[in-house]
Image (cartoon, rainbow, N blue to C red):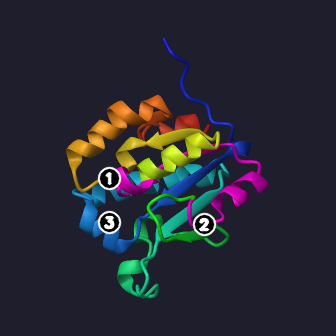
Amino acid sequence: MTQPLALDRSHTALLIMDYQNRVVSDVVSDPPGVTHRAASVLQAARRASIPIIYVVHRRPGTDPNSPDSQIHSDVTPAPGEQVFVKSKPGAFSTTGLDVTLREQGVDTLVLLGTFTSGCVLSTVRWAADINYKLVVVGDACADRNAEVHRFLVDRIFPRQCTVITAHEFPRAAGVA
């Protein structure tokens, strides 16, 4: 029997990626289910005092103030929670995210996001290459193609990270 996951809260950060209204409505087949699971992870991370970092994708010419560009109301940032803006799929390539995480002493990332085959996959690959320990909350991620999502979460991600559910996260964070 394997030991349950126990996160070192002092060296962990939660990344919430691409949870803008437009993306959630275009990509997620069950928006209320996914966003509610994401919200439960977010609330547990806040109770555990795990830093929360948002990463949003902004295409050139997109109005950052439009309702479509806003982060979904179920996972709205609290004061002091950082928001990084990216222009490529992954969270690292066009942001200063790695520098910020290293400055904070973070070595473990908990990931959730829309576009499992885009931002989540790209971020997992990049973060693994630069030696972060990774946890993906599989049921708080979504993709347009449910089969691709399942394949990534069940077969690909476990090669580089630990995959858990939103229900399992509070225990891993020590706030169950």
Q: Amino acid at mark 2?
A: Thr
**Mark 2, residue position:** 95
Q: Amino acid at mark 1?
A: Ala
Name which residue lies at 42% across and 48% down: 121
Mark number, residue 24: 3
- Along the viewing direction, whichever of 52 and 144 lies nearer the viewer: 144
- Along the viewing direction, whichever of 112 and 130 lies nearer the viewer: 130
Mark number, residue 5: none
* Residue 113 lies in the magenta-colored region: yes
Specify the quadrant of the image occupied by residue 78. bottom right
Between marks 2 and 1 in the image, the one whose residue lies nearer the viewer: 2
Q: Compared with residue 8, is residue 144 higher up or lower down, i.e. above or below?
A: below
- Along the viewing direction, whichever of 42 and 18 lies nearer the viewer: 18
Which is nearer the N-term, disc 2 or disc 3? 3
Image location (x, y in percent) of residue 142: 32, 52
Question: Do the CB atoms of the residues marked 2 and 3 lie less than 8 Å apart?
Answer: no
Query: How far, Cα to Cα, is label 3 from label 1?
Result: 9 Å
Which is nearer the N-term, disc 2 or disc 1? 2
Name which residue lies at 24% across and 56% down: 144
Judge from the rendering whether residue 168 lies leftward or rightward of residue 11; answer left or right. left
Judge from the rendering whether residue 50 lies leftward or rightward of residue 39; answer left or right. right
